[in-house]
Image (cartoon, rainbow, N blue to C red):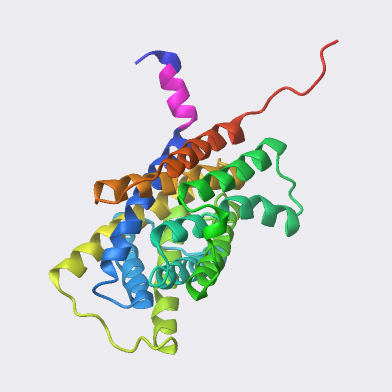
Amino acid sequence: MHPSASSWIQSKAPQLVLILITIIWGGSFITVQYGLNFSSPILFVALRFAAAAIAVSLISYRSLHHFTRLDWVAGFLIGLSIAIGYGTQTIGLQTITSSESAFLTALYVPLVPIILWLIFKNKPHIMTCLGAGLAFIGLVFLTGNGFGAIQLNYGQILTILGSIAIAFEIILISHFAERVNIRRVTVLQLIFASLICFIMAPLLGETSMPNFNGQLIGILCALGIASAFIQLAMNWAQRVVDPSQAAIIYAGEPIWAALFGRLAGERLPALALVGGVLVVFSVILSEWRPQLTKKK
């Protein structure tokens, strides 16, 4: 490999890892939908993150000591965001299509810089704002429906609430990443996410555990390992990647979801292909920092 190419890969390693996360996330959509044939939604999320917590604990057992107060605070807040985000998204998937869910969940793309601006007074770069706007438009086209086909029913409202929670998750991870131990906080956030969902399940009418057949166990193990990798990688990569930029990269998730859906027999409309191109371009746009100074 050419030295310049190797140095570029090393410098962009966090961004490349986040892109890999979007590929795994994209595949999880169809997996979760299939898993809901065997379990109620909140208990499914609780079991999914319990499996992830076990997976991370096995990988990181040597680091699981001397927990600080900040580790516990970060783990709880991020875990709460995960529980709300994935819980509402999974409930929503029972009543809306996967394309609507992908679009509504991806609202966190423009929400991250907006929240950073409104709450933390952290004004985003103009190219990040343009990239977020373009990603939003692309994600609308990616559904193949357009704005006119989006009607806010119960499932859609829940999914929008989930997208807000996911936006806070991305912001919180970046906020705590440089001040805590990655592995300890990852374990804590997964445990808290699972416990919160287990507590909420009976309050939402989910009073009986699912039948643990081979298919459900396989799905939970696969999602657990995937979730463990995603949380570890997010916490590592977002030490150096701006949260607004990270949200734009995550916008690639529906592209991979559409591709995996295509492999599973779903058809990808021409309008959705246009949306995919716009989302990819939005990633490039968000990275671009043109020189705006005038030449003498």
Whether residue 58 is visible, yes or no, is: no
Q: Nearer the viewer, residue 234 or 259?
A: 259
Q: Quadrant of residue 293?
A: top right
Q: Nearer the viewer, residue 244 or 154?
A: 154
Where the N terminus falls, by quadrant?
A: top left
Q: Is residue 174 left or right of residue 114?
A: left
Whether residue 220 is visible, yes or no, is: yes
| On screen, residue 234 above or below 189 | above
Name the residue: 25% across, 58% down: 222
Q: Residue 116, image x and y in percent?
A: 69, 53
- The secondary structure that most of the magenta stretch takes on is helix
Name the residue: 33% across, 44% down: 259
Q: Which residues are magenta?
A: 5-12
Q: Is residue 226 left or right of residue 10?
A: left
Q: Residue furthest left?
A: 214
Q: Nearer the viewer, residue 264 or 122?
A: 264
Name the residue: 29% across, 87% down: 208
Q: Residue furthest front?
A: 148
Q: Nearer the viewer, residue 86 or 146?
A: 146
Q: Please tell me how many numbered marks the rendered image carries.
A: 0
Q: Residue 10, image x and y in percent?
A: 44, 28
Q: Is residue 294 left or right of residue 21?
A: right
| On screen, residue 289 above or below 133 | above
Q: Residue 276, image x and y in percent?
A: 46, 40
Q: Quadrant of residue 198?
A: bottom left
Q: Is residue 204 magenta?
A: no
Q: Residue 185, image x and y in percent?
A: 47, 60
Where the C terminus falls, by quadrant?
A: top right
Q: Residue furthest right?
A: 296
Name the residue: 40% across, 69% down: 90
